[in-house]
Image (tube, rainbow, N blue to C red):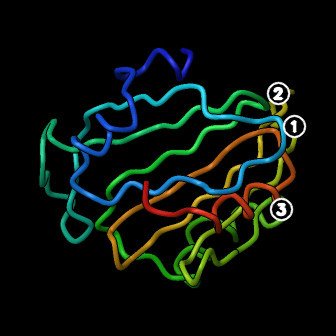
């Protein structure tokens, strides 16, 4: 399924109206790349303590699609507090060849480098990080060097 078919197309103003959290957008994008589309979808929010449903269909996730390299920025609410040690145990130790820990403006995260999976598909670079103060999870994926995704992530500012 094409990610661009999920959710509803929105303008940046509509995103800001619907969001119950700050919307941050990159002030840096690699040359020749521009924002093409924003899509919003409703989802479920679960408690990290007891896996209890906190909110049903009132939670928004926003995906920002860029013009090249399958570049996507996702912003979603997350009540799961993350630490570098927790990320190492949960994500990095399983695939140390492709994943490493990073910090984005002081927030814990990890990057997974592009590689060919077991069925022969080339996977993009994935960068995930959590802002524990704002209760937000961010993800950027695309076929660009991880340094470019990190630079985009570090440039996020309020929309």
The residue under the point 71% across, 27% down is 67
Q: Position of residue 110 (x, y in %)?
A: 66, 67
Q: In which quadrant of the rendered view does residue 2 lie?
A: top right
At 69% from the left and 58% from the top, the residue drawn is: 152
> Residue beneath label 1, please?
116
**x, y (%) of residue 100?**
76, 70
Query: For this rendering, which residue is in front, 21 or 44?
Result: 21
User: Depth check: 117 or 5 in front?
Assistant: 5
Front one among 109 and 32: 32
Q: Is residue 139 above or below residue 81?
A: above
In contact (CB < 8 Å): disc 1 and disc 2: yes
> Label 1 to label 2, Cα distance in Å?
5 Å
Identify the mark nearer the N-term, 1 or 3: 1
- Estimate the spatial distance between the alpha carbons at disc 3 and disc 2, rounded to whole Å: 22 Å
Q: Regarding mark 1 in the picture, which secondary structure is present there?
A: strand
Q: Quadrant of the N terminus?
A: top right
Callout 1: few (<14), some (14-19), or many (20+) C-alpha neighbours within 10 Å? few
Q: Which residue is mark 3?
A: 147
Mark 3 closeness class: few <14, some 14–19, many ≥20 residues within 10 Å: few
- The kind of secondary structure element at disc 2 is loop
Which residue is label 2 attached to? 121
User: What crowding class fits label 2: few (fewer than 14 Cα within 10 Å), some (14-19), or many (20 or more)?
Assistant: few
Compared to residue 29, the image places residue 51 above or below, namely below
> Of tags 3 and 2, which is closer to the observer?
3
Badge 3 or badge 2: first in the primary sequence: 2
43 left or right, relative to 118: left
Identity of the residue drawn at 38% across and 54% down: 23
Residue at the location (77% across, 29% down)?
68
């Amino acid at each position: 399924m094409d990610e661009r078919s999920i959710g509803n197309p929105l303008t940046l103003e509509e995103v800001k109206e619907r969001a119950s959290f700050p919307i941050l957008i990159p002030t840096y994008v690699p040359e020749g790349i521009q924002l093409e589309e924003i899509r919003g979808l409703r989802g479920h929010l679960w408690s990290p303590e007891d896996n209890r449903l906190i909110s049903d269909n009132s939670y928004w996730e926003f995906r920002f699609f860029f013009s090249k390299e399958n570049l996507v920025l996702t912003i979603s609410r997350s009540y799961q507090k993350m630490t570098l040690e927790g990320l190492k145990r949960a994500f990095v130790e399983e695939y140390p060849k492709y994943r490493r820990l990073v910090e984005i403006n002081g927030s814990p995260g990890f990057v997974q480098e592009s590689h060919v999976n077991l069925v022969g598909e080339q996977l993009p670079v994935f960068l995930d990080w959590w802002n524990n103060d704002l209760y937000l999870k961010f993800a950027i994926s695309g076929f660009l060097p991880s340094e470019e995704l990190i630079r985009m992530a570090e440039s996020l500012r309020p929309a």
